[in-house]
Amino acid sequence: MLHRNRLFPALAGALLLILGGRQAKAMSLPTSAQDSITRYEVLIDSSFMAGNLGDYPRAESYLRQALRLAPKGQLQAMLLNNLGGLQLLQGKDDAALLSFGAALEQSPSDPTTRYNRAQLFVRKKNYKAALTDLSLLISAYPKNELYHYQRAMVYLLTKEYDLAENDLRAIIDGNGESLKARVGFALLETMRGNYNEAERLYAYLTDKLPRNAEVYEGRARMFLARGMRGFAQRDINLAFEYAKGGVPATLYRLRAELHESLGNEKEAEEDRKQAEALERKAMIR
């Protein structure tokens, strides 16, 4: 979670610059400055180890102390992004939003933090704010397929289907062979209720990607929307099989929908809880 090899030299360099020039050596620093760097490294190491052990409150405490020693700017922004990640793992979504916001105040062009915040806005159903962050990312990186795809998915949530289509077509315009964009189009047609077109796209995708979990998850979603629960169950099972150890939160949520439609409330709740846990971990970049 914490990029130690990137953080230590950055802090040392920043302190050296503050104390008198890029050519200064660590050995010439005053003892207090050396102590600050050493303490910073210990705190980052301690936070990293605590996080690996799953002790997120302690990891957050160490990281907060490290933040006090870091100069403002890109380094502190990186630490604040990491702090937001630790807070997400503890279910402290509002605190994470504040941390991501503080990081962006110091490094507004950082795409990682802005993307993390956009994801969190989506999970909190603040779609307008998520679209703002994604639009800023696309403005800075107009050919980035991931940002276009994610904005298209948010437009699907807001039922702005024409805008979702525009983003998916932007991907196709830059990469005519993009299968990811076609996965998005299949989902778009499902949302529009154009099931025949969606099924045609999924037939193409299962031919090109016969063991792709995302494709089977999408087709299962279409079948569920059509009330074809047996076919949906089959594709959900295949999606879990092909995902192996990397089952996404969306697949658990889809299975929860299926369970709910069958009256299996206990199983649905278990899948929703699993999805929430995965969503938090997925946002730690």
Image: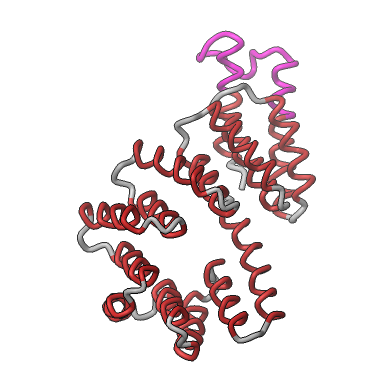
Return the x and y of residue 11 as percentages of the image width and height.
60, 26
Q: Is 17 colored magenta in this rendering? A: yes
Q: Looking at the picture, how far across and down is residue 28, in whole percent?
A: 64, 13
Identity of the residue drawn at 49% across and 45% down: 128
Look at the image and tell me whether residue 285 can be seen.
Answer: no
What residue is rendered at 64% in x and 70% in y? 272
Picture quadrant where residue 203 is located: bottom left
Tell me: 90 left or right of 215: right
- The picture places residue 15, in percent across and down from the top left corner, at 61, 18
Identify the residue at image location x=39%, y=49%.
147
Depth order, front residue of 240/42: 240
Q: Does residue 56 appear to the left or right of 106 in the view shown?
A: right
* Quadrant of res 282: bottom right
Instruction: Determine whether 222 is above or below 14 in the image.
Output: below
Q: Which portion, as a residue range, is magenta?
A: 13-39
Q: Main secondary structure of the magenta part?
A: helix
The furthest residue to the top: 20
Q: Is residue 197 magenta?
A: no
* Residue 29 sits above or below residue 197 on the image: above
